[in-house]
Image (cartoon, grey):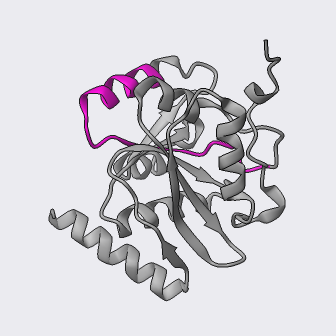
């Protein structure tokens, strides 16, 4: 294990111990990691603590507007990838090419797409998993129980509603840091008419 990884791991575990947050599950080396519920800017810190405590350094899609002087450098150094929501195509295509070439590709996506309460999750995590064949890994932050970590892994079957039923079942008792801002796991594609 590289020195940087060991230092990050020790740092993350110390912070979790000092703040009395409990870490559960292990982060896989490959996959599309869904981070939810996404209710606070602290979710980014929680994601780093989960990954670093497990000796992993994932890439994290973050809204481009956060990459301002100073904080942008920190975001990039910790795996942040700027995403222009008005034109995400180029970023996603580059990530897909990287996923094909790198057998230890781990990408974190906040599927809710916002820290505010919404009606739907963004379906990018599902589409990227389908296009790459990578599994979807369910990560979580639950403020009321002071627990964060990893849940089950699933491979999209193409039956969006059935797959999302599994996602909903897992996140049913996960509230995030600010529970009032939690968005129920639901994709617009679930409401598409069936033929």
Q: Position of residue 10 (x, y in %)?
A: 30, 77
Quarter of the image holding residue 93? top left
Please name the residue shown 49% across and 74% down the image.
23
Q: From which residue to which does the magenta span run? A: 92-116
Q: Position of residue 38 (x, y in %)?
A: 67, 53
Q: Position of residue 79 (x, y in %)?
A: 38, 47
Q: How many marks?
A: 0
Residue 55 in sight: yes
Q: Per the image, is 97 magenta?
A: yes
Residue 107 in sight: no
Judged from this view, the residue extending furthest toward the left is: 2
Q: Position of residue 91 (x, y in %)?
A: 45, 24
Please name the residue shown 72% across and 50% down the image.
168
Q: For the N terminus, which image quadrant? A: bottom left
Q: Is 106 rendered above or below residue 7?
A: above
Instruction: Give the camera-side residue of 67 and 141.
Output: 141
Please name the residue shown 32% across and 58% down the image.
56
Please name the residue shown 63% across and 42% down the image.
111
Instruction: Give the camera-side residue of 50 and 126.
Output: 126
Q: Is residue 43 left or right of residue 105?
A: right
Instruction: Give the camera-side residue of 162 and 136.
Output: 162
Quarter of the image holding residue 178? bottom right
Q: Is residue 84 left or right of residue 135?
A: right
Q: Is 22 rendered above or below residue 51?
A: below
Q: Per the image, is 166 magenta?
A: no
Q: Is 11 rendered above or below residue 104?
A: below
Q: For the C terminus, which image quadrant? A: top right
Instruction: Give the camera-side residue of 52 and 148.
Output: 148
């Amino acid at each position: 294990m590289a020195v940087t990884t060991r230092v990050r791991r020790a740092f993350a575990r110390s912070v979790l111990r000092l703040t009395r947050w409990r870490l559960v599950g292990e982060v896989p080396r490959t996959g599309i990691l869904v981070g939810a519920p996404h209710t606070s800017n602290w979710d980014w810190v929680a994601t780093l603590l989960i990954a670093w405590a497990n000796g992993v350094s994932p890439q994290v899609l973050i809204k481009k507007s956060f990459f301002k002087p100073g904080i942008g450098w920190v975001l990039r150094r910790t795996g942040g990838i700027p995403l222009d929501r008005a034109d995400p195509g180029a970023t996603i295509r580059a990530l897909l090419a990287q996923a094909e070439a790198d057998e230890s590709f781990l990408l974190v996506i906040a599927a809710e797409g916002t820290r505010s309460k919404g009606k739907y999750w963004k379906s990018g995590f599902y589409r990227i998993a389908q296009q790459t064949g990578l599994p979807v890994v369910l990560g979580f932050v639950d403020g009321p129980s002071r627990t964060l970590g990893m849940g089950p892994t699933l491979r999209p079957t193409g039956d969006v509603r059935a797959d999302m039923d599994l996602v909903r079942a897992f996140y049913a008792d996960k509230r995030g840091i600010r529970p009032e801002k939690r968005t129920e796991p639901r994709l617009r594609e679930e409401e598409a008419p069936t033929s």
